[in-house]
Amino acid sequence: MTKLQEIDKIKLEERVKEAYSLLSPCHLCPRNCKVNRLKDKRGYCKAGLLPEIASFHPHYGEEPPISGCMGSGTIFFSHCSLRCVFCQNYSLSQMGEGSEVSIEELANIMLKLQKLGCHNINFVTPTHYTAQILTALVIAKEKDLKIPLVYNCGGYESVETLKILDGIIDIYMPDFKYGDNASAKKYSSAPDYVEVAKSAHKEMHRQVGDLVIENGVAVKGLLIRHLVMPDVRACSDRVFEFIAKELSPDTAVNIMAQYYPTHLAYKYPEIDRFPTINEYSQALQTAKDTGLNYGWRQTVSTLVREKKPEWKNGKAPDSDILTHGVGKV
Ligand code: SF4
């Protein structure tokens, strides 16, 4: 049973009300813009009252237990409360690509993805549409949505909002982007990212615990993504230290090599390049040194852009260098 199946309809409707109460004035996320979203006013994220989505489809490129064999039912929302200068989805997150959908349409998209056989519904960058997603879930629950819900976010979340999702979301899949606020301020305009992300990750872990996989597919838990940046700008060591010491060494962590200089990264010479194999290898070693022992790394071919991102959880066959990555799934 998923959490959505388990939760009582009245309780779910109460959560919808709570979420909408955060929209006017809007303090759904740590930006705390205080605009009246109920009147379609737009704050930092540029999201209005109705949800906007850029695409939805079965996604086969997520982590193996998220994609499974039938794909993850991914819904890409437009807009974002972060401003990452290297965002690989900047056309939708920052330039607003996408179209408005009604709440009913959003619910139907979820049901369609379920009908296609997807293993889960994967809400990508959902934070600013939490209230609308919950409303759509009331409809989808009535129509027997019964696959796990994945909250795939940037890690810059308000604990107050996350608490509304307690008992509804099965899998949290946040980024933990930076271990240092100077980088977070410079590259994502989020000078308080580290403290905010730490509190948010603790709350997500409290709600769902470590990742649970059944028959090769994730059913509940926390999966954290960390993108290794050039010039150690993500301060990966501090991120891994926090996860291992303050969450759990058994936390599933995907240490990603797929950074490439896109969007506005050309303005910052130190990140206007791919990470080196040495930088990525060092991040993997640091993760291991902090005690993390579960998750994924990406292959060297991902790093040097020979192929699309590829997941690896053992020794990379094409490299002697990445022999010490986390991963024993
Ligand atoms: S969700 Fe958007 S409008 Fe609301 S506080 Fe966050 S950035 Fe501002």
Image (tube, grey):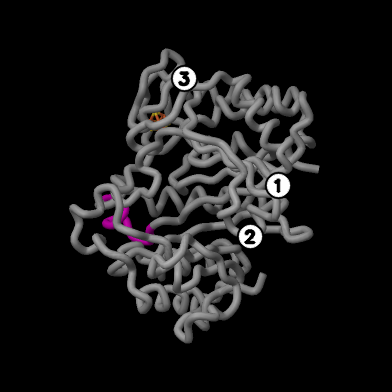
Quadrant of ligand 1 in image: top left
Q: Closest to the observer: 8 or 151?
A: 151
Separation of marks 1 and 2 at Cα, in angstroms? 11 Å
Give yes or no for residue 179 being in the magenta stretch.
yes
Q: Which residue is mark 3?
A: 49
Q: Residue furthest top?
A: 39
The answer to whether mark 2 and mark 3 are in CB contact below 8 A is: no
Q: Earlier in the sequence, mark 1 or mark 2?
A: 2
Q: Which residue does the numbered mark 2 point to in the structure image?
A: 64
Residue 24 seen in this snapshot: no
Please name the amino acid that badge 1 sits on.
His
**First in sequence: mark 1 vs mark 3:** 3
The residue drawn where x is 61% and y is 70% is: 294
Residue 236 visible in the displayed image: yes
Q: Nearer the viewer, mark 2 or mark 3?
A: 2
Image position of 191 (left or right of 308):
left
Q: State which quadrant residue 305 falls in.
A: bottom left
Q: Which residues are magenta?
A: 178-185
Give the x, y percent position of residue 262: 30, 52
Marker count (numbered):
3
Q: Is residue 53 magenta?
A: no
Quarter containing the C terminus: bottom right
Which type of secondary structure does the marked residue at label 1 adopt? loop
The residues bearing labels 1 and 3 have C-alpha atoms spaced at a distance of: 29 Å
User: Which residue, given by chain and number where applicable, does mark 1 sit on?
Assistant: 119
- Mark closest to the chain's N terminus, 2 or 3: 3
Farthest front residue in view: 306
Return the x and y of residue 17 as percentages of the image width and height.
Answer: 60, 21
Q: Amino acid at mark 3?
A: Leu
Q: Residue at x 42, y 48 (%)?
A: 196
